[in-house]
Amino acid sequence: MLLADFRVRFPEWALASDAYVQSYLDAALLQLDSSVYGDTIDEAQAYMACHLMAVTPAGFAAGLSNK
């Protein structure tokens, strides 16, 4: 998933920097098997990135906005 698409889909991560979000999008993709997710790999990547950001102490510091 492109960073710009992530930003539109998940505005609650607006307070996190682009570099921070991109690093988790990259990490998420490494954990997913495209043969399993097929055409939904972008969605799986985005949700995995959200999960990874949310469960880390740095994710809490990045803060979810209430928008």
Image (tube, rainbow, N blue to C red):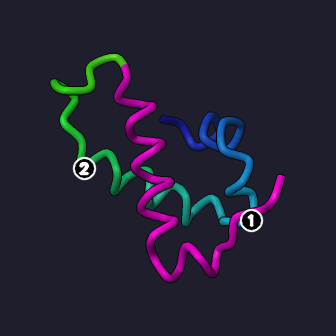
Residue 33's label in the rendered image is none
Q: Which residues are magenta?
A: 40-67
Residue at screen point 40% across, 49% down: 48
* Dot 2: element: helix
Residue sitting nearer the eye, 59 or 7: 59
Residue 15's label in the rendered image is 1
Magenta residue check for 42: yes
Q: Residue 40: percent from the left, percent from the top?
A: 37, 23
Residue 30's label in the rendered image is 2
Q: Residue 15: percent from the left, percent from the top?
A: 74, 65
Marks 2/1: CA–CA distance:
24 Å
Whether residue 19 is situated above or below residue 22 in the rendered picture: below
Residue at screen point 53% across, 37% down: 2
Q: Is residue 27 left or right of residue 6?
A: left
The type of residue carrying mark 1 is: Leu
Query: CB under 8 Å between callouts 2 and 1?
Result: no
